[in-house]
Amino acid sequence: MTRILLVDDDKDVRDVLHSILLSSGYEVEAVEDGAQAVAAFRLSSFDIVITDIVMPVKDGLETIMEILELRPGTKIIAMSGGGRLDNVDFLETAKALGASLTFNKPFNLRELIGGIEQLAAEPAE
């Protein structure tokens, strides 16, 4: 079974995604910020990390860098509702840092599930 670490500071988004991913047959651990994500990642293995970008405590870009430092080749999906801030496109930056896929919020849930299925089917690096 594919294990997913879900990271989003918005409780409503986190709860909805958690429920949808569980009902889609995934094992999911949900946390509210990047610091919790890195701590959870150190304690357990996950096949895919889905992270928001704009979060307090530790943002998604820092989270992506730390997770890939701990385990290079980790499959990461970055998502963000924040557009451009100071001319920085967060999702382009996430992709450059090593995110496998990116999604703008709001996104189509079928596309997200399709992306997860695609990543889960790829051999681990």
Image (cartoon, helix red, strand yellow):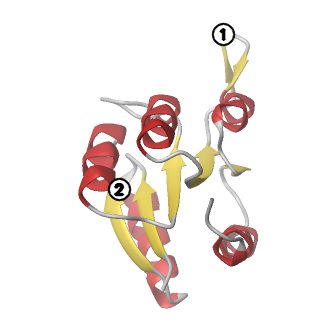
Residue 10 in the figure: left or right of residue 42: right
Mark 1: secondary structure: loop
Graded by Cα atoms within 10 Å as few (under 14), some (14 to 19) or many (20 or more), the crowding at tag 2 reads: few
Give x and y (percent) for residue 111: 76, 69
Which residue lies at the image location 46% right of the left edge and 36% below the top edge? 69
Q: How many marks?
A: 2
Residue 76: image location, x then y, percent: 59, 52
Q: Which residue has dot 2 on it?
A: 11
Q: Name the one closer to the observer, 35 or 41.
A: 41
Q: Name the residue at the top extreme.
A: 86
Q: Nearer the viewer, residue 64 or 70?
A: 70
Q: Position of residue 40 (x, y in %)?
A: 27, 54
Circle 2/circle 1 CB separation < 8 Å:
no
Question: In the image, 61: left or right of 103?
Answer: left
Mark 2, secondary structure of its residue: helix
Between 29 and 10, the one nearer to me in the picture: 29
Which residue does the numbered mark 1 point to in the structure image?
A: 86
| Lower position in the chain sequence, tag 2 or tag 1 | 2
Going by the image, does 72 lie left or right of 34? right
**Residue at image x 33%, y 48%?**
37
- Which label number is shown at residue 28? none
* Disc 1 residue crowd, few under 14, some 14–19, many 20+, Cα 10 Å: few
User: Left of 41 or right of it: where is 88?
Assistant: right
Q: Type of residue at label 2?
A: Lys
Give the residue at x 46% y 59%: 13
For badge 1, the amino acid type reads Asp
Q: Look at 23% across and 57% down and name the residue there.
A: 43
Q: Toward which corner of the image does residue 125 lie, by quadrant?
A: bottom right
For the residues marked 2 and 1, what is the alpha-carbon distance in whole angstroms? 26 Å
Please tell me whether residue 25 is drawn above or below residue 44 in the rendered image: below
Residue 32 is situated, as x and y percent measured from the top left of the image, at: 32, 49
